[in-house]
Image (cartoon, coloured by chain):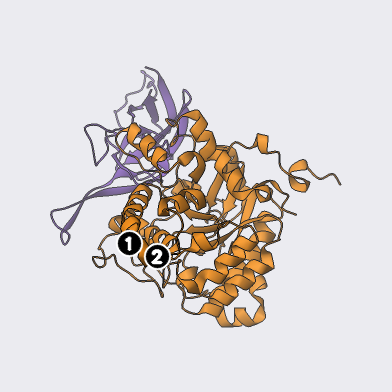
Chain colours: A orange, B purple
Amino acid sequence: MTLTTTEASTRDRTKLSLVDCDVHQEIRSWEDLRPYLGPAWWERIGPKGPPFGRRAYENVRGHIISEDMINPATGHAADDPNWVKAELCAKYGVDLGILTSNILGLSSHPNTAMASAVARAYNDWTLDVWVRPHSEFKGSIVVAPQDTEGAVAEIERLADAPGVVQVLIFSGSIEPYGRPRYWPIWEAAERHGLPLAMHSGGETVGIAPIGTLAGPLTYYVEHHALQTQSAQAHIVSMVMEGVFERFPRLKFLIVEEGISWVPHVMWRLDKDFKGNRSECPWLNRLPSEYILDQVRFSSQPIDEPRKLEHLLSMFDMIEAERTLLYASDYPHWDFDNPKAAFNDVPAALRQRIFVGNALDLYGDRLLASNR
Amino acid sequence: MAKHTVGIVGEIPPGQRKIVELESRSIGVFNVKGTFYALRNTCPHQSGPLCRGRLIGLLRASDSRHLELSREGEILRCPWHGWEFDITNGRSVFNPHKLRVRSYEVTIEADEPDPSIETYPVTIERDRVVVHV
């Protein structure tokens, strides 16, 4: 049997032109996880799945999936790797898709052991069905950060699994991610050289609070616009509690929160820190320096200011040439088309966003074989 | 301008649509309560497949409690980011003056009748749907 080069050996970095750091593979039903959960957890959870909760805010008629991205053979979206390869990879030119799952409510589930059990099963399913057989996909180690012990164990279990490129958590949480209870998880990620990715999800349900600092909003459109509040709180917390000082090799990728809030956070923190240094004296650098060195951002949903130069200014403010990674969010409704959304971005910068920064962030794991 | 027959009336019942390729353009042809419309299947936002979206009505409201739905089946919502377009003229709902998608004239044409037979002009299922590109 002859193995094709992309399956058996390291991918050639010069042949990569588009890495997508946010592709949502989906289980069709919880039955898909049954063999991976094992009889005891399946007995406990069953076909209805864990009570992850329906969010308080939803798009019109619960619209999440773009209609054209539904697999006609099954009526589901992103449920078959071959369908996703034909759609996302062939149609939109994605060479490598990093998988971010469809269990975005995991992090706000109060039953910590159950959340970790679901994460383990989901990771095994992902590696079995998506990553090992298909070199176009890379896997995340999904963990439940509310379960420190379980999350660390899962990172230790899968850190060396071929095809895995990062640890993945979701932003819905009981406390911001700079708090010490989470530090053993970040330590494990750093020790294994795995970036930590945080994808939006899990807010307004379970143990995660609903509401802004002004109280809960009314409409999905409001909630979606201000979804960035979650990322802001986590970033500020991680910087000021010293996570990036304590774990200097840790890279933190924020997925699906856009970028226009980033300059705001950097400038406010830097200014306030100069006077309030004594409140957080363990920091040896300015907050913005930690952010630009150790935090990365996915591009979706890309901001669309009226003037192109404002978008380019923002890219300049966040040093996008080293911090920004392309994401499609396939198959969700706010998908960013790589053949349209970046056409006005200068070519050299676009190359960094499409490929260069992903290569830098993920290193050898991005190119290594999935087997 | 060229005329293209995209099918017959009976193929696209009211509320249904057909997406065709004409002169290298993807175009959606819709039957809205018996009248045919055609729109370019490319959303002006990010080039999404607009004509695959849901056909909805126009929701208006003077305040949050009193919703009014009109023009059911005449608004097309892009399957990607949800932008709404009036099927009858391609104009966007949120900014009809500046943003629109290309719309095409559609006519229904019967084949030439046999002049030796007395006929009555009635649109029937076999008449052709013709898009003018």
Query: Mark 2 is on which residue type?
Result: Cys
Front in this rendered view, residue B76 or B43: B43
Residue at the farthest right position: A1
Q: Is residue B51 left or right of residue A243?
A: left
Q: Is residue A239 left or right of residue A34?
A: left
Estimate the x, y position of residue A108 in percent, counting from the top left. 45, 71
Q: Is residue A281 left or right of residue A143?
A: left
Callout 2 touching callout 1 (CB < 8 Å)? yes
Q: Give a yes or no on whether discs 2 and 1 share a subunit.
A: yes
Please tell me which residue is depicted at 51% across the width and 30% down the height of the picture.
Answer: A348
Estimate the x, y position of residue B21 in percent, counting from the top left. 48, 29
User: Can I make out residue A330 in this image?
Assistant: no
Estimate the x, y position of residue A123 in percent, counting from the top left. 62, 64
Dot 1 corresponds to which residue?
A276
Instruction: Chain letter for mark 1, please.
Output: A
- Residue A280 badge: 2
Q: Does dot 1 land on a helix, a strand or a loop?
A: helix
Please tell me which residue is depicted at 63% across the width and 57% down the height of the picture.
Answer: A193
Please tell me which residue is depicted at 42% across the width and 56% down the height of the picture.
Answer: A64
- Compared with A194, A40 (above or below) is below
Query: Mark 1 is on which residue type?
Result: Asn
Q: Does dot 2 land on a helix, a strand or a loop?
A: loop
Other residues around mark 1 within 10 Å, as few (<14) / some (14–19) / many (≥20) = few
